[in-house]
Amino acid sequence: MNSLANVMAVASGFFLMGYKGPPANLLMTSIAINLALAPMTGVIAMRRHRSVPFWTLIGLALGAWALIAILLLPSNVAAPPPPPSKYPPTSDAA
């Protein structure tokens, strides 16, 4: 159970806090972190026009790492074209 708790702690990002408690507490806290971050990862993916089910599942498995990844990825939508320029004026505008 100790190795499973360590794997979950690394996957959720909870390992970075340096928590040294019983494996059961580490495992349950890591699961709680992943359950809390998965919907947030999905919402950010939706706003960045990414696959919501995919990123929610990745957030459920990887917790803080998935959240950091979706925050660093650019939006999946192309930038709108720039508005037409009004300069130089046409001949009838002069």
Image (spheres, grey):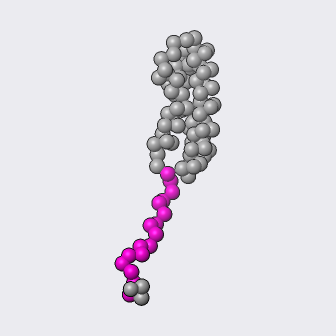
Relative to 46, residue 28 above or below: above
Q: Is residue 92 left or right of residue 49?
A: left
Residue 29 quadrant: top right
Residue sitting farthest toward the bottom: 92
Give the residues in magenta.
75-91
Magenta stretch containing residue 79, yes or no?
yes
Magenta-colored segment: predominant secondary structure: loop
Q: Nearer the viewer, residue 43 or 55?
A: 43
Q: Is residue 89 left or right of residue 17?
A: left
Q: Position of residue 76 (x, y in %)?
A: 50, 53
Q: Position of residue 61 (x, y in %)?
A: 57, 32
Q: Position of residue 26 (x, y in %)?
A: 57, 17
Q: Nearer the viewer, residue 67 or 89?
A: 89
Q: Is residue 80 left or right of residue 26?
A: left
Q: Is residue 28 visible?
A: yes
Q: What's the residue at 57%, 40% (across, down)?
A: 41
Q: Position of residue 46 (x, y in %)?
A: 59, 48
Q: Nearer the viewer, residue 76 or 8?
A: 76
Where is the C terminus found, in terms of image quarters?
A: bottom left
Q: What's the residue at 48%, 63% (across, down)?
A: 80
